Amino acid sequence: MPRFAAVSGLAGMTPSGSLADGGVLFGRRVMTLVRGLHGDAVWWRNGRIEGVGTAREVDRRAPRRLPRFECRDALVTPGFVDGHTHFAMWALGRRRVQLIGAGSRAEAVARVAAGTPSQGWIVGHGWDANGWSEAPDRHVLDQVHAIPVYLDSVDVHAAWVNSAALAVARVMRETPDPPGGRIVRDAAGEPTGVLLERAVELVSRLVPTPSAEILDEAIRDAQAEAHRLGVTGIHDVEDERAWGAFRRLERAGDLRLRVLFHPPVAALPHLVRRGARSGTGSRWLGMGGVKLFLDGSLGSRTAWMLEAYEGSRDRGMPVASEAEAREAMRLAATNGIAVTTHAIGDAAVRRALDLLEQLPRTRLPHRIEHFQCVHPDDLARAARAGIVASMQPAHLLTDIPLVDRHWGGRGRGAYAFRSLLQRRTAMVFGSDVPVASIDPREGVYAALERKGFYGAPGQGWRPEEKLGFEEVVRGYTVGAAHASGTSRRLGRLAPGMEADLVAWAVDPAVERGDGDAFRAGHAALTVVGGRVVMHP
Ligand SMILES: [Zn+2]
């Protein structure tokens, strides 16, 4: 395990609010991503970068009154942007009782007992009774909470509830199983509190939707967690409730993430009527492209493939007809709205390319989300058409065995980072949180090492597709700025650019491509719009 150097404490913090958007940072190296601009120190004022250079130079030029931050062992990069999030969903999910990894029923119940009620309910997620010696039942939950308790299983195909929740849902001995679902019952015929498949909805539909206040508070908390991890911006794929929350936070002066927002295709007629355009918005909140789906996912084998899955006759499936997708895309693009297309299988990626290539260009580039498997014949097409490939390296941590099993040799085109980069494809990297962790260390590690969560295979999986460290950082910075039309003010550390930056306490081995070293380090200081939003 490589060692990483601890960062020295921050010196010179001033309590004065008037200087909040200026500062001087001394690091080991500043990675500006601007050719010819180097240094180990950077300073900024009024939210914008003023200069990068040697510590002596910068110290001399920066006014005395600016706070000085000492991170002499740290690598400084532009702020990291997560190119694919479901941020509000994640934010709300963080407030639930977390049951992932609970190794016994008793441990799960103890976590539930410590849970905080919200709108009169206790809601939890992530239990997995495989390996428990005692089956989940309502009575053990009744002993810790009299108010309704609703707990999703890790695969969300089952729910575990208490007696109060069953009472609210009027589920009792006489209640018949709904079509496609089962109310699990004990020997006496009484519901045990476990609901399977469609029976889950008997209770889940009664769990209160979080109020606007709860949503806003959850997003504020999640924003602080993003800052802690070195994330300064997101490309968010969600509905109008999330948009409303970001708007409220911005109006309150509390939004400190650069948000590019991708509304669902269902909102398209409304967006067109309202005259919404991609690439418009404020410094904080911008309008992205409209999101539509062409296929499903690898894990559920619904990703749409050109040939059948290994050992099967099934090719997955398109989830929208070609005519339907073409029509929606045309309506969007002719009205100045970019198209953000979910495509995972090689057939879906090909169709996305076929359709997007024909569209008029908009102010923001059209993009393909996931781009998980691409046929060799299609490798150069995104670059040629100016389409952005929005990819999530951290999915490699779990997907390597699935790709081998389901796609066999076609895995050559899966997570084909280097092949795409060699063809000058514009790439943006993200996490798809909450599907994977928003922590950029996971994605950087995966893109550098191409290994599973526990480090296998040793040499990396299809190692010819590994990227170098700076190439990976570009995916989270320059690439994100390109995709959001903000390259003139974000993504690099040059004078005049907005001061969004992160000091990473990482071993210098990361710059030689050591993903383990990056994973073992941490963000030590995060600055957004010139303001220090996280320091130890
Ligand atoms: Zn997603």
Image (spheres, rainbow, N blue to C red):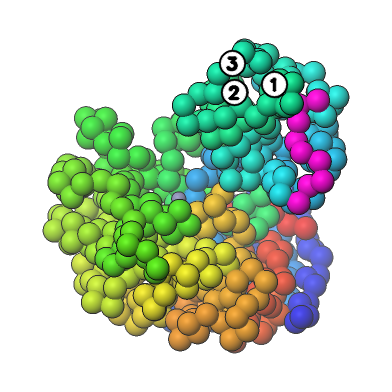
Q: Residue 307 location in percent, x, y? A: 29, 67
In the picture of the structure, the residue carrying the numbered disc 3 is 175
The reply to whether residue 465 is visible in this rendering is: yes
Sooner in the amino-acid sequence: mark 3 or mark 1: 3
Does the stretch in magenta take in 337? no
* As drawn, 34 above or below 134: below
| Magenta extent | 131-139
Task: Answer with left or right where residue 329 lies relative to residue 522.
Answer: left
Q: Is residue 133 magenta?
A: yes
The amino acid on which the numbered mark 2 sits, given as a three-letter code, is Val
Find the distance from the CA under tag 3 to the CA under tag 1: 11 Å
Residue 397 drawn at (x, y percent): 58, 67
Q: Earlier in the sequence, mark 3 or mark 2?
A: 3
Q: Is residue 27 left or right of residue 6?
A: left
At 13% from the left edge and 58% from the top edge, which residue is drawn? 358
| Distance from mark 1 CB to nearest ligand 1 atom below 8 Å | no
Q: Is residue 529 above or below residue 134?
A: below
Q: Is residue 232 above or below residue 243?
A: below
Query: In which quadrant of the rendered view does residue 261 lie?
Result: top left
Q: Secondary structure at mark 1?
A: loop
SS of the residue at dot 2?
helix
Q: Which residue is mark 2?
A: 203
Does residue 511 appear in the picture of this structure? no
Outermost residue, front side: 187
Residues marked 3 and 1 touching at CB (< 8 Å): no
Residue 344 lies, in percent from the top left, at: 37, 60
Quarter where residue 481 is shown: bottom left
Q: Amino acid at mark 1?
A: Gly
Task: Give yes or no for contact between labels 3 and 2 (Cβ–Cβ under 8 Å).
Answer: no
